Image (cartoon, helix red, strand yellow):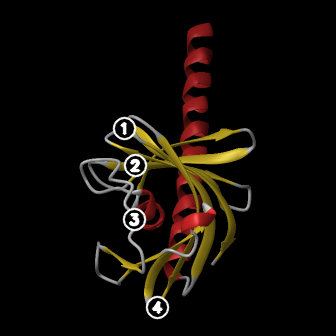
């Protein structure tokens, strides 16, 4: 009798986990669908890029509209104002003015200036690999392709507040997100 009761309890627990898991995935999918439907998106990121021999810090502003995507450097002050534009249907960044070259973070061309467009692409097209709750935030690990994944922390209102980008499972971009508007 005890074995049967234990089996029923384990099965019930698994069913509850599965239902909660599907609800969490559905919630992310609703966020992603809303993001895809948004005509405009903007946010700010305090970004740290980790290279094997150094770290670099930036504050970047991201904007997506009908004309494409744009990333602007807000800090450090000596390079503030540098902008990069991603044209619709293109995977390359077009810099206006000075070229900011701190080097790629991986063999696939991920740079601090391309990190926010890649994060946004992952939020739009990434598949949920896993999810959990941490410090009152909903956390999703998203897989974009064979090389790029993102772990994103969401507020209760499903607004991204923090993100990490990993290339081949090596986390190289850390972001604190703010001013999210869509």
Please give the name of the residue rendered at 36% of the width and 38% of the height, measured from the top-left corner: 169
Which residue matches tag 4?
66
Looking at the image, which residue is at 62% across and 17% down?
5
- In this rendering, the count of numbered labels is 4
Residue 10: x %, y % from top left: 57, 23
Q: How busy is the neighbourhood of tag 2: few (under 14 within 10 Å), some, or many (20 plus)? A: many
Residue 87, by quadrant, is bottom left
- For marks 2 and 3, give the CA distance: 11 Å
Q: Is residue 89 visible?
A: yes
For discs 4 and 3, the disc positioned in front in the rendered view: 4
User: Mark 4 or 2 closer to N-term?
Assistant: 4
Q: Relative to the observer, which residue lies in front, 142 or 1? A: 142
**SS for dot 4:** loop
> Do the residues under discs 3 and 1 have CB atoms within 8 angstroms?
no
First along the sequence among labels 2 and 3: 3
* Cβ atoms at labels 1 and 2 below 8 Å apart: yes
The residue pinned by badge 1 equals 169
Give the CA separation, mark 4 to mark 1. 32 Å
Q: Which mark is residue 125?
A: 3
Helix, strand or loop at label 1? It is loop
Q: Residues at badges 4 and 2 in contact (C-beta under 8 Å)?
A: no
Distance from Cα at disc 3 to Cα at disc 1? 18 Å
Residue under circle 2?
A: 149
Question: On the picture, is 87 further left or further right than 29?
Answer: left
* Label 2 SS: strand
């Amino acid at each position: 009798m005890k074995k049967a009761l234990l089996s029923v309890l384990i099965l019930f627990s698994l069913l509850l986990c599965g239902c909660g898991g599907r609800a969490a995935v559905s919630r992310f999918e609703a966020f992603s669908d809303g993001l895809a439907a948004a005509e405009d998106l903007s946010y700010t990121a305090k970004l740290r890029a980790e290279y094997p021999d150094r770290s670099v810090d930036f504050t970047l502003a991201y904007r997506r509209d009908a004309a494409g995507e744009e990333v602007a450097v807000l800090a450090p002050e000596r390079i503030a104002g540098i902008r990069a534009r991603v044209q619709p249907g293109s995977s390359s960044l077009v810099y206006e003015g000075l070229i900011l070259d701190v080097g790629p973070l991986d063999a696939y061309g991920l740079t601090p200036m391309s990190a926010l467009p890649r994060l946004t692409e992952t939020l739009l097209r990434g598949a949920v690999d896993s999810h959990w709750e941490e410090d009152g935030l909903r956390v999703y690990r998203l897989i974009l392709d064979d090389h790029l994944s993102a772990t994103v922390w969401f507020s209760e209102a499903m607004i991204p507040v923090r993100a990490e980008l990993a290339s081949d499972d090596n986390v190289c971009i850390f972001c604190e997100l703010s001013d999210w508007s869509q």
